[in-house]
Image (cartoon, rainbow, N blue to C red):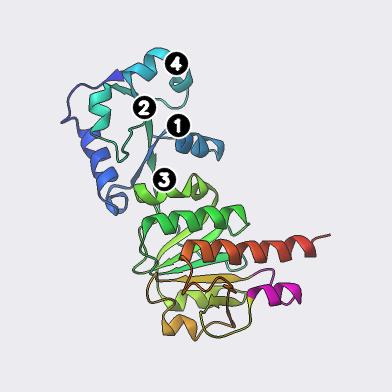
Amino acid sequence: MIEISSKDNPLLKTIRRLSQDPSAYRKQGRVWLEGDHLCGAALDRGVKPLQVIVTQTLWNSSPLAWRDVCDQVFVVSEALFQTLSGLESPAQMGFVLDWKPDNLIQPNQPTVVLDRVQDAGNVGAILRSASAFGFKQVVAMRGTAALWSAKVLRAGMGAHFGMNLIEGASPEVLTQLAMPLLTTSSHQGPYLHELWAEQSLPAVCAWVMGHEGQGVCNEVMSMAQLQVRIAQPGGEESLNVASAAAICLHASASVALLASP
């Protein structure tokens, strides 16, 4: 265990950059996780942190809980930990992880494509739904919020650690997927519930979720084998993209479950 008392410590400076700059992880090759739930999710997936940062209070109350997690455990005061936190109510511990980008598409893996989805909360929520419904690959096109930023990580609630995550993709990358490409549309295509009832919804597919305001770009839309509408009997103009993703991914997961022996 090593105590840190200076806010100018190089490790703490790195963590602040990771916490405050959404794309800093690409330059640093490191990711900052804050909070015992998110860190616990990483451990459950077999992820080993490079460093553990805990407050003095947490260390005093449960030193053995963190001593065996990794070789480098650093203890800071509560006030110093607050300078690292991106939360209104700071947690009492966090992990620094090694990060390397996933570069290879898995052609047969059920996939979610994010086309310039810009809100970090939406991106994280979509990753969480994707993981829950068996879509273990996410392809983020250029213009999408940084997948490993602190806000996306918090919204993803640990989903990141069991997925193949591709960033900065161009539309041409999608041709590597050996499955139908499906998009949502507010004005054309069959309704999702009708496809599900007719058992004509592909069990293995890639769902494309588009920009919050502009939707899926024309180039990707032209590549889709199927455009699908979600019925909205309440009459709202549109659905939040994370809500739409959850509905679509659940429908595909239901098809896959019904088709399994």
Determine if the magenta segment contains residue 191. Answer: no
Q: Which label was assigned to residue 36?
A: 1
State the SS at label 3.
helix
Q: Residue furthest right?
A: 261
Q: Earlier in the sequence, mark 4 or mark 2?
A: 4
Spatial CA distance of label 3 from label 2 is 15 Å
- Labelled pair 2, 1 in contact (Cβ < 8 Å): yes
Pick the quarter of the image with the C terminus: bottom right
Callout 4: 10 Å neighbours few (<14), some, many (20+)?
few
Q: Earlier in the sequence, mark 3 or mark 2?
A: 2
Q: Amino acid at mark 2?
A: Gln
Callout 1: 10 Å neighbours few (<14), some, many (20+)?
some
State the SS at label 1.
helix
From the viewer's perspective, is 95 left or right of 41?
left
Front residue of 143/78: it is 78
Residue marked by disc 4: 62
Give me the residue at 37% from left, 73% from top: 213
Q: Earlier in the sequence, mark 2 or mark 1?
A: 1
Q: Position of residue 160 (x, y in %)?
A: 49, 50
Q: Amino acid at mark 1?
A: Asp
Q: Position of residue 173 (x, y in %)?
A: 47, 74
Q: Amino acid at mark 4?
A: Ser
Residue marked by disc 3: 154
Q: Residue furthest top?
A: 60
Residue marked by disc 2: 92
Spatial CA distance of label 4 from label 2 is 12 Å
Spatial CA distance of label 4 from label 3 is 24 Å
